[in-house]
Image (spheres, grey):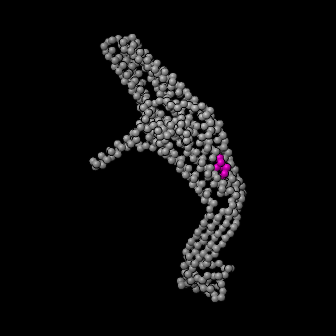
Amino acid sequence: MIYRTFALSLLLCAASTAHAEPLSRGGAVARALRQNPQLAAARAVEDQSEARGAQADAAQFPTVNITLGVGPSLKAKLVPGTGSLSTENTYGDVGLKDLSVALGGQLQILQPLYTFGKISERQNAAAHELKARRAQTDMTGAQLAVTVAQLYESLLFARDAERFFQEISHWLERSAQDTQHEIEKGAGTREQDLLRMQAAIGAARMGLHQASAGKHQAEAGIVAYLAYPTGSSIEPKEGALALLPHELPDRAKLIALASQRRPELRALAEGSAAFDALALAEAAGNYPDFFALAFADGAYTPGREVASSRYVKDPLNGFYPGLLVGARWSITGLMSTQRANENRAKARELAEMKRWAELGLPAEVTKSFEDAQRAKADDVEAEKAVAIAKRWSVQASADYAVGLGDVREVTDATQAFVQLRIASYDAKYRYNVALAELERAVGGFHAPEPNALYPSREE
């Protein structure tokens, strides 16, 4: 029992530290694009489309029907000199000695010759559907990459904020202790000063709680999206949250890239083509199918002689082959026409959705582009303001320590410093996430170009 408990403990320890190695942005996205079950499900849908294409291909090959059977039969002898008459009555005076076992079967081979597009257009539809499904897989992967990027940047944000609030809390607690000592010594410090300090400590602790919760939530999300074992620890390679070192290209260039690479446009175009091809296949239902048919019927019964007459067919003893070329026409009124119209309407629906997507692409790219521009500008201003607020806080604390300042100056400066520092973290987070969204907007997560706006490959 002791050994089993020890082994279990080792397994738990191994599970909890299995993925403690540093994880980069590109590594996180790349692993998600390999391991996430959502992509596995999307690829399973691709396999379904590929199987439907194989079914359409199989329709052009011969259809073979084979029937085999065994059962009782009567023995029979031919009248000498004739080809068909038996010397026995059909059912009169039948005994067990007159019965035998019959072995028989049928073979039919039907080969389509020309179907007016029923087969070929379904093959085209299946090929277009497969391309559309692959584009949808890329869409799923792109959205997945953005989600992982948000989680990763959130983790960096929360870690930095947690460290910052810990420092602020410690500093405020020391200041509150100094204030308490001044009150106890009767140095003229008011109790209201201590209350303001304690209120600031409470606010800092609430910020610490929020940052800690955000860190654990981001870690749990990354573990889930990267398909790590439950309880795995995440250690980012980046020591702190910082702006990604990418210069934004010209917006017009980004819009042009989006028009070329967005998987949504490919999915809608291929889907529309698939329904157009399926409409042609359904419309071909108004025309006949030409085919070649080869068949053979055969049976063998021991004790039953073969009738050699060309006018009599013995179903229980003999071999009868044949070959036909013919046409088959199923007349269903307007059924085929209306099915074709339904698929044409679906094709038009997807074509209009594609047109709307093309019209909306510039706006989507512009939104992410401007979000990134604004976040970068905000970060520049926030860093300047943080430096100013820090100087203000240091001076206010120094003045208060020597009795030349008011505690409100200290708490006001501290509050401004905290707000601006968090605003600086937020600007960096928004900039990096905006780059990830811009990468998705231009269809870059599955593009072959290595210079991505947001990293999506192992570093």
Which of 206 and 433 lies nearest the eye of the viewer? 433
Residue drawn where x is 60% and y is 47% of the image: 132
Which residue is the extreme one toward the bottom? Answer: 80
The picture places residue 8, in percent across and down from the top left corner, at 33, 46
Which of 452 and 91 lies nearest the eye of the viewer? 452
Which of 12 and 20 lies nearest the eye of the viewer? 20
Residue drawn where x is 42% and y is 32% of the image: 239
The picture places residue 66, in percent across and down from the top left corner, at 58, 69
Left or right, 190 with reference to 321: left
The picture places residue 167, in percent across and down from the top left corner, at 39, 25
Q: Is residue 245 above or below residue 272?
A: above
Residue drawn where x is 55% and y is 43% of the image: 138
Q: Is residue 92 visible?
A: no
Where is residue 193, by image quadrant? top left
> What is the magenta segment's predominant secondary structure?
helix
Left or right, 229 with reference to 379: left
Where is residue 404, by image quadrant? top left
Residue drawn where x is 61% and y is 56% of the image: 56
Q: Which residues are magenta?
A: 272-278
